Amino acid sequence: MSIRDLGKQSLIYGFGHVLARLITFLLLPLYTHSFTQEEYGAVSLAYAFIGFGLILYRYGMDTALMKFSVQTTGDEKIKHITVIIISQIITGIMFTLIFYLSRNLSAYWVLGVHKPDWMVYLSIILLLDSLWSLPLLILRAEQKATLFISFSLLNVVVTMFLNILFVVHLKNGIEGVFKANILASGLLLFTSFPIIIQRIKISAFDKSTLIKVLKFAIPFLPAGVFTMVMELSDRYLIEYMLGTKDVGLYSAGKKMGMLGLTAVMGFNMGWTPYFLKKGKERGARLEFSKITTLFLGIMGYLSMLVSLWINEIMRLSIFGKTLIGPAFWNCNEVVSMILLGYFFFGTYIIQLPGIYIKEITNWVPIFRISGALTLIMSSFYFVPKFGFVGAAYSVVLAFVSMTLTIYLKLNPIYTTPYNWRAIFFPVLVLIGIQYNITELHVKLTLSFLYPIIWYLFIVTDIEKKGLVRLLK
């Protein structure tokens, strides 16, 4: 697989990931116009819980499915997929029953309100979401882009339609959000399940294979937990220190800033299979360095554009209504800070090849722990001092902690010849624009100059030649 192939894979599967994430952005206008800040805060806490729950439901099996779908063939592939799918179905039902039976005790702690019925909805959503994502992982591993994108598009269309039906037309409020999610996930599971049926044999279930898969998967569980702590605990900390209204405001800003996360994860969908295949080839580290320059340059530019123009984006009028409800406009400072944070997440993701090549994946939880602890400890300082914006400062520090920790571990044992100018240039730009720039001519100038300066003064001659070949 060449860099051009990586670009194609990242675009294809990144587009599918963007479609999945598109729901978040399409629903944001609907929710910010339909719910109060407190109501949207409750919805955000519910989905924060789903994020935590999915890590438990998957316990690293999603990563195992990707690995063994790529690196095994024939009967071995069938055996591994069978073991993973059956395990996910059995444990998924068990976890859902546990959440259902404990709904009266857990509702207030999870949602900030005593709504046991909501916990029933959430337990069903967790089961369906954990299962319907498995066929998509198989499609991604097998590079079946058309089907992958088709299911992603179906997810967007159905989820949007059902949310409009239940929330806007039937006025079911927050329960309408949950009902829409259950029906959409159920439909996706039903339509995608044949993909699983065609690739498993019940008789192929093997105890020794199960033990092998679990040994690989389980170490990713704590890493996943700490990932979700970083991704979602900020909302619970704001709820604890400030209240549900501030959760709603912060969540609206973070949703806009998650455009950066979408870009990183879209890239990672092509990046992971690329470095798994390319990693031990001669000259791989130089290739990784070139990819780093290209990825971070583009990532920095996109993050800068959104940060500069976020006020105009939020006030964009569509059919007489602004993109984001006026009550949520003062979340703009959160957006630019979150984008900076996800840029640093990109600098972490780009270093992962060394972890896999040197077979030290047991360090991944440690990197995640450093980020999670940084976020929690810094939040207790920044949130009381700066309000909900302080949580965004903590997100930035958390991802900086992760990227520094992985670099310090890898550099002595897997040194990559990075173009450091290409790393620091977008970082300095993104830090510099945290100042609230309002002048139109300044915004236009920065938007125009970034790619010119990057190409003329940041990219090396070797990288320019590679870029030219890539674009031909």
Image (cartoon, rainbow, N blue to C red):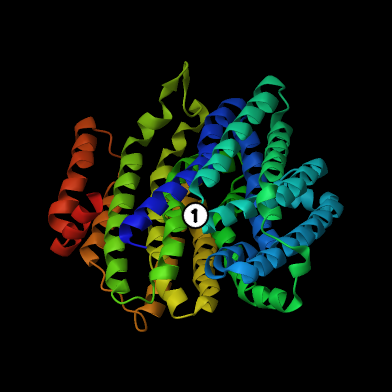
Q: Position of residue 472 (x, y in %)?
A: 22, 49
User: Residue lying furthest front in this view?
Assistant: 74
* Corner quadrant of residue 39: top right
User: Residue lying furthest bottom in this view?
Assistant: 413
* Corner quadrant of residue 315: top left
Question: Does 320 sit above or below residue 428?
Answer: above
Front residue of this view, candidates 421 and 436: 421
| Residue holding disc 1 | 143
Callout 1, which amino acid?
Gln
* Numbered disc total: 1
Who's the residue at 39% across and 31% down the image?
313
Question: Does 281 sit above or below residue 35?
Answer: below
Who's the residue at 66% across and 77% down the image?
212
Q: Position of residue 66 (x, y in %)?
A: 56, 63
- Please say whether residue 361 is visible from this viewpoint: yes
Side (left or right) of 175 relative to 408: right
- Please say whether residue 254 is visible from this viewpoint: no
Question: Does 458 sit above or below residue 210?
Answer: above
Q: Position of residue 399 (x, y in %)?
A: 44, 62
Side (left or right) of 105 relative to 321: right
Q: Position of residue 430 (x, y in %)?
A: 30, 51
Question: Does 159 sit above or below residue 140?
Answer: above
Q: Secondary structure at mark 1?
A: loop
Side (left or right) of 365 relative to 115: left
Q: Quadrant of the N terminus?
A: bottom left
